[in-house]
Image (cartoon, rainbow, N blue to C red):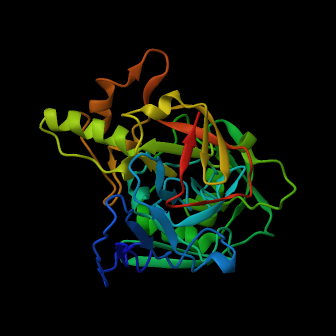
Amino acid sequence: LKFEVVLLNVMKGPRTPGIATLLVAIASVAPNALAFLIVPAPQRIGRTPSSRRDRNVLFAADDSVIRLTSLIRYPVKSGGAELLTEAIMTPEGVAGDRRFMVTRHDGSYLTQREIPRLATLEARTDEADSSSILLRSGGSSIGVNVQRLSSLTDASLFGASLKLVDQGADVGNWLAGALGPPPVRVGGGNVISMLQQTLQGAPPYRLLHAPRDGESPPLRNGAGLSDQAPYLLISEESLAALNEKRAGEDLPPVPMSRFRPNFVVSNCDGAHAEDGWSTVTIGDSKFRVIGPCPRCTVPDVEQASGERDTASDGPMATLKGYRAKRGRGVLFGVYLMALNPGSIVRVGDQVETE
């Protein structure tokens, strides 16, 4: 029995794709022989045990099985994406996902809704909750030694009061150069904080960190620093349906990155099949479907440039035409919560649903 083997070097780092280095095909004499794809793990993965760090992901090219095709985290809330090959699941999301948040000096949160350029803020850590983080925007960068023992700073996120750790004035000033001045807070801000900023020349931004000590309860009942829930899943079939409708409107396709999922799956039974799921199992990791994701205006932000589409040309305009549900908003993707935190999810894992 002969086999067909394809070896692709697809990733040299988190941003730069590699070049195919070997393609050896030996035709099989068996008519139903499976082809296998071997994908090298990237150099940076979410707090994976060292014995797994160089593990290749091996999966059969079986179109009848739903599989995880992308695993993504966002170290800074509303910042750039980091593609992973495997990661540990926690009660508050993929390990290392949205543990940092950019705020005004008074601790009020900021997202791409207020500052679209946050999309261009790249963040890289060596591990999921490591001792340092590297931020980059355009040609400028800054390394930050993560502060965990500093006094806690008051912050707010969607009405919830939080206690987070300020990462210092240097990164606050760097953010001012990278993002420009922050927008004026609707309804005003913390008067004492604004006076302090004016009188002491404090930076207009803070980078705040949400450390985990293993004993504190999950932040915001498990939502962490995400908008509503710790995990977001979208199928490739749902995106294909959106882009098919955009083609009919003479509009260009949009990539999955516009919707900022953690899990992307393929081989589903049609577009929006995920809407009907109640549980999802990815490899050995089990999740409960909380409900559909009502979309805000962030999908109208081009993630590579931080530029916002016009209201008529963005994907939200297309989605409103067929995914708007009365009293629920414009729905795209589903929110999940982990049922067995501590498990590991890997790209290529089989996905089972109920």
In this rendering, the answer to whether 177 lies above or below 281 is below
Q: Quadrant of residue 61?
A: bottom left
Residue drawn at x 32%, y 34% as measured from the top left: 316
Residue drawn at x 27%, y 72% as measured from the top left: 27
Residue drawn at x 35%, y 41% as measured from the top left: 237
Q: Quadrant of the C terminus?
A: top right
Please give left or right for residue 242 compared with residue 331 in the image: left
Residue 72, how many percent across, how many down? 50, 58
Residue 21, how many percent across, how many down? 31, 84
Relative depth, front residue between 189 and 253: 253
In this rendering, the answer to whether 8 lies above or below 152 is below
Q: Residue furthest right?
A: 215
> Total label count?
0
Residue 110, how many percent across, how many down? 52, 49
Residue drawn at x 42%, y 45% as measured from the top left: 64
Q: Quadrant of residue 13?
A: bottom left
Residue 296, how many percent across, how many down? 44, 35
Q: Quadrant of the N terminus?
A: bottom left
- Is residue 332 visible in the rendered structure shown here? no
Q: Residue furthest left?
A: 250
- Is residue 336 visible in the rendered structure shown here? yes
Relative depth, front residue between 139 and 82: 82
Please give left or right for residue 192 compared with residue 274 in the image: right
Q: Residue furthest bottom?
A: 21
